[in-house]
Amino acid sequence: MKIIKTIAAVKKETRKLKGKTFGFVPTMGCLHQGHLSLMEQSLRENDVTVVSIFVNPTQFAPNEDLDSYPRDLKKDEKSLKELGVDILFFPDVKEIYPGGYSTYVQVEELYKVLCGKSRPTHFRGVTTVVLKLFNIVAPDNAYFGSKDAQQAVIIKKMALDLNLDVTIKALPIVRDTDGLALSSRNTYLSGPQREAALCLPKALRKAEELIAAGLEDAAQIKTEIVKELQQSKLVEIDYVEIVSLNSLKTYERSEGTMDIDVNNTLVAAAVKLGKTRLIDNFILGEI
Amino acid sequence: MKIIKTIAAVKKETRKLKGKTFGFVPTMGCLHQGHLSLMEQSLRENDVTVVSIFVNPTQFAPNEDLDSYPRDLKKDEKSLKELGVDILFFPDVKEIYPGGYSTYVQVEELYKVLCGKSRPTHFRGVTTVVLKLFNIVAPDNAYFGSKDAQQAVIIKKMALDLNLDVTIKALPIVRDTDGLALSSRNTYLSGPQREAALCLPKALRKAEELIAAGLEDAAQIKTEIVKELQQSKLVEIDYVEIVSLNSLKTYERSEGTMDIDVNNTLVAAAVKLGKTRLIDNFILGEI
């Protein structure tokens, strides 16, 4: 595996292999099986797989966990080598955002809802760095996890709107044996918090079962999830939202119905346990 | 010359010629010798030259001249064929901005000054459409006129920040025999307005001469230009600005000096004659 730190070197390396197909997995490191499943898929579908590890400052607000975000390069390197990843791009912050950096990309509307409500500058940072990384790596396919469903929807929309040559693929959430969605931020949780966090996947699983059994009213589904999340005193609800998958619009009573479209719906929730914010969701349809 | 109306067809056409160098000149049509000089340069420097004609709605404010902007496709087509341009991309508005279009690119700070003061949404529209066109055409070199100096500076910054593979080239202003900078909007001017408009290049030429003779104080240079522009009652000044070329920052007395950097300065002015807004400038240094 080649480890590359500069943009110029990545461009040189990827451009000289023109004709090969490139798969790309952008990450912030501290890799877990959710990330690795993306790379495995990329390795299956492309001649060359490029992974980036970059804790992107522009997607963190000043009060968020940029400094404490978990980093473990040695372990990540080992995982990537074992998988057979071809290139690891591991740039410094100054390489990505040199002095005087000024250009930002925004997907209007989609960035404001769900996680964007409590993190209003987050997705601008995500789309900007992902667009830059796409321009640097020039991939044919790029892989994103569905735990960050809003992120995948937004990036897919950006790629469509900006006429990029990359295909965006959103792969299923990978869960721990107890059901908790894998996340680098799970390492922040204390024992009791970890225990309490399980109400998140449990609430969503229950909602999924209710829908499978025929419940279609968005308000009722939401109520069931909220009820479940309120079982634990350690859990503070950030949001529970049931939205149309690609527009991220909530179902409105004013449209005559609050029945969900069972082929195009995202049911998503975010909770806080102490300072740690966790998200989870399930998708009816395909991003 | 191939005339292409769809994004898919341009991509197919340009991607199949991989290995060749591509020059690209994005325009809004109604081509004059200023545009043609860009194409001539592209034809000299590249294997294939692509020109786009697209009157871009997102760079016009609702009160501006989108509907009346001059269009003359037959004449443009003839000019492009005679020059030897290889591909004309001439898309519909719906092809570039399909329903639900949402993604915008902004170069912070640079978009707010000079023309951006009276046209606050203008450069967001320009950077967005130019980025889209770059992604569609995938050029090695792209050519812009220096009459729109701020546009060229902003696009160069966008290309740098977003790690694009395109080289931005800003070519000199082309003027009519009487000195007026060529512009598609010159067709809006009445006889007396056209006559009055000449004070714009005249004022700038005078300032250039004063600088050549040793005048370096930005405030004094500005005063001289304003004095000249105030000669005509038909001319209303929008702005006269003397700024650092690449940052577009005005020279501030608080920095201890208002002396200009004679190797990195843009002297720019915009005036209105009736409803018609004209811009002109001269550059010390290189964009």
Image (cartoon, coloured by chain):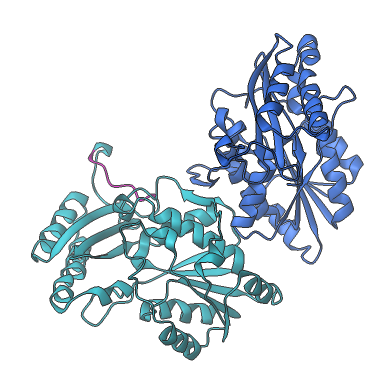
Chain colours: A cyan, B blue
Q: Position of residue A235 (x, y in %)?
A: 14, 64
- Single out the residue that lies furthest toward the front: B256
Q: Position of residue A90 (x, y in %)?
A: 52, 75
The answer to whether A13 appears left or right of B101 in the picture is right
The mark total stands at 0
Q: Position of residue B50 (x, y in %)?
A: 78, 49
Q: Position of residue B167 (x, y in %)?
A: 73, 56
Residue at left offset 68%, top offset 61%: B165
Q: What is the quadrant of residue A216 in the picture? A: bottom left
Q: Is residue A249 magenta?
A: yes
**Is the residue B187 above or below the residue A237 in the image?**
above
Q: What is the quadrant of residue B229 in the picture? A: top right
Residue at left offset 73%, top offset 35%: B216
**Is the residue B109 above or below the residue A20 in the image?**
above
Range of magenta residues? A247-253
The answer to whether A62 appears left or right of A194 in the picture is right
Residue at left offset 18%, top offset 49%: A219
Q: What is the quadrant of residue A187 in the picture? A: bottom left
Asked whether residue A122 appears in the rendered view, the answer is yes
Magenta span main SS: loop
In depth, the one of A52 and B201 nearer the eye is B201
